[in-house]
Image: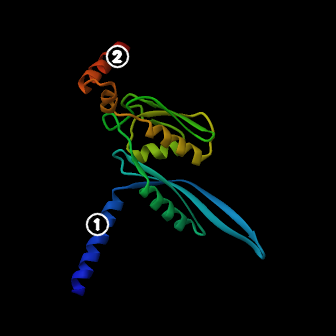
Amino acid sequence: MAQERREGGRERSRDREERDSEFVDKLVHINRVAKVVKGGRRFGFAALVVVGDQKGRVGFGHGKAREVPEAIRKATESAKRDMIFVPLRSGRTLHHDVEGRWGAGRVLLRSAKQGTGIIAGGPMRAVFETLGMHDVVAKSMGSSNPYNMVRATFDALKNQLHPKDVAAQRGIKYSTLQARRGTAVAAEE
């Protein structure tokens, strides 16, 4: 009985490791804070981490602790709990241009042609890389605070609509919407 329990526990931990290994995490920012107490200062660390599976799911988390590795671990766990799915066109770019806001942070995300690459600043680049996006042009037009930039980017990504959803809202067929898009793209070129 005890042997079976141990093997079951090993399998569960192996499953957890496999699930964790599918995610890519990027450390965006570490902030050191000091609390002044009698006898000196006590230092603490806050970490901002972005986690994604590079297939359209991404999340961010914030963790605080006395040591850096512990703060990063807490932030990673928090990011894995609050993940969102973002529909990507051809698995490489956005379906449409979108703007996001959070506090004083404002970002503009634009879809791009194949081969453009990720043209974005620090915190936004981390989000796109963990998301699995290959072609995007992004501009931060407000606060350069990493927390605000990441949250504004997530606000924009949450507003990203899949063409199937747009077709359903308009009451037309998805194929009709795609045909219209094809003629618009041909007209641009």
Q: In what quadrant of the picture does the C terminus appear?
A: top left
Q: Residues within 10 Å of mark 1 (few under 14, many from 20)?
A: few
Q: Residues within 10 Å of mark 2 (few under 14, many from 20)?
A: few
| Residue 55 % position (x, y) | 33, 46
Q: In what quadrant of the picture does the N terminus appear?
A: bottom left
For the point 25% across and 81% down, the residue is: 5
Q: Secondary structure at mark 2?
A: helix
Q: Amino acid at mark 1?
A: Asp
Q: Which residue is mark 2?
A: 184
- Residue 158 vertical position relative to residue 49 in the rendered view, above or below: above
Q: Along the line of sight, which residue is nearer the eye, 75 or 113?
A: 75
> CA separation, marks 1 and 2?
47 Å
Q: In this rendering, does residue 122 appear at all?
A: no
Q: In this rendering, does residue 29 appear at all?
A: yes
Q: Residue furthest top?
A: 187
| Residue 158 % position (x, y) | 44, 40
For the point 52% across and 66% down, the residue is: 69
For the point 29% across and 71% down, the residue is: 12
Left/right placement of residue 126 relative to residue 174 reads right
Please give the label number shown on residue 142: none
N-term-proximal mark, 1 vs 2 = 1
Left/right placement of residue 150 relative to residue 56 reads right
| Residue 111 % position (x, y) | 42, 30
- Residue 161 vertical position relative to residue 51 in the rendered view, above or below: above
Q: Along the line of sight, which residue is nearer the eye, 98 or 117?
A: 98
Q: Please identify the quarter of the rendering in which residue 167 is found.
A: top left
Q: Secondary structure at mark 1?
A: helix
Please give the label number shown on residue 15: 1
